[in-house]
Image (tube, coloured by chain):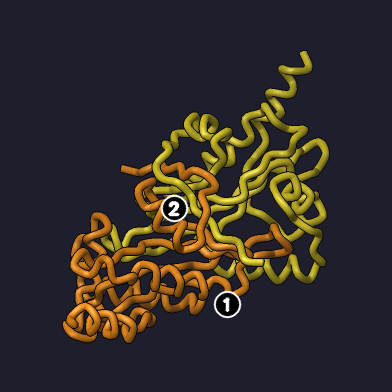
Chain colours: A yellow, B orange
Amino acid sequence: MQSSNSLNSDEKLQVRKLEISDKNKGFMELLQQLTVCDSVSDKEFEERFREISSCGDDHFICVVEDDQSGKIIATGSVFIEKKFIRNCGKVGHIEDVVVDSNARGRQLGKKIIGFLTDHARSTGCYKVILDCSLENKLFYEKCGYKQKEIQMVKYFN
Amino acid sequence: MQSSNSLNSDEKLQVRKLEISDKNKGFMELLQQLTVCDSVSDKEFEERFREISSCGDDHFICVVEDDQSGKIIATGSVFIEKKFIRNCGKVGHIEDVVVDSNARGRQLGKKIIGFLTDHARSTGCYKVILDCSLENKLFYEKCGYKQKEIQMVKYFN
C-alpha cells in the first residue's frame, strides 16, 4: 500500500513561489543537479532574490517542497518578455526546470511546467517557449509543447 | 564605383538604441517583415517603449537608421535574465532580429548581432542565446554562435 500512500502524498504537494528561506531547504543543491551551480553566500542569494522579486509577476520562480523531508525537490522559472510584435504582445520564457533525482517519476516536472505555463497565460502571453535537449523533447510534448526552432548559443570566457 | 560608395556609406551606419521617434521611421513596418505585427497606436507604442526602457540595460532594443532615407532598416533586441545558477549568473536572450528586405547583403544583420552580443557581454552575462530557424543557422554560425538545444513552444489561443 506504500505506493498508494505515496501517490496521495504527491497529490497534496503544492507548487509555490520561491521564498528566501528556501536557500536553507536545498534549493541551490537542487539547481546543482541541472548545471554548474557553485554555492553562493546568503548575501549574494538575498541580493539576487530581491532583484528577481522586484520584477513581480514578470519573473516568477516556483518550487515544490517535500512535506516529509522539508527539502525543495522541484523548481522552474518563467520570465515575461515584452515585445512590440503581435500587437505589443508578451512571451513567456521557461528556464531552469529541475526535479530532484530521488523524486523522479512522480509527475513533479509536469506539475512545474503546468504551473509556469498557466502563469504565462495568466499574464497575457500569446505563447510560452523553452529550450531543451533532444532527450527531453518527449517530456515537453506530453506537456503540450511542440518543437519549433533551434537554439544557438555563444559562451563568454 | 557605386558599390564602393555604398560600402563606405554602410560602414558609417551606426547601431543605436531604439528611440520613441523611431515609430515614425518605419520601425513597426520593419517588424512586420519578421512576423505578425499589427499597427499599434502612438499611445500603445509609448507605453510599451517606457515599460521596456524602465529595465535599463536589462532590455535593450537597437536599430540601424538609413542615413539616406531616414528609415529604420535593421533591428534586434536583447534582454538579460538573472539566474541563481552559475554563481548568480546572467544570460542574454536575443530576440526579434530583422533586416529590411531591401537592405540585405550589407552585413547589417551581422552588425546587429555583434552589437547585441557585446551588450550581453558588457552586462556580465556568461552566455547569450537565441532561437532561429534551421535556414538561419549558417548566418548565426558566422556570427560565432553554435547550435545547442531545440526550442519548444506552446501557443495560447
Q: Nearer the viewer, residue A97 or A2?
A: A97
Pointer 1 or 2: first along the chain:
1
- The residue shown at (39%, 68%) is B110
Q: Is residue A130 shown left or right of residue A82?
A: right
Crowding at label 1, few (<14), some or many (≥20) Cα neighbours within 10 Å?
Answer: few
Q: Nearer the viewer, residue A2 or A34?
A: A34
- The residue shown at (69%, 46%) is A34
Q: Secondary structure at mark 2?
A: strand
Q: Nearer the viewer, residue B95 or A151?
A: A151
Report x, y in % for residue B86: 70, 60
Residue under disc 1 on the same chain as residue under disc 2: yes
User: Mark 1 falls within which chain?
Assistant: B
- The residue shown at (56%, 40%) is A133
The type of residue carrying mark 1 is Ser
- The residue shown at (50%, 47%) is A130
Residue at the front extreme?
B1
Q: Which residue is mark 2?
A: B131
Residue A64 position (above or below residue A36): above
Report x, y in % for residue B37: 23, 60
Q: Quadrant of the N terminus of chain B?
A: bottom left
The numbered dot on residue B122 is 1
Q: Is residue B62 shown left or right of residue B121?
A: left
The type of residue carrying mark 2 is Asp
Crowding at label 2, few (<14), some or many (≥20) Cα neighbours within 10 Å?
Answer: many
User: Mark 2 falls within which chain?
Assistant: B
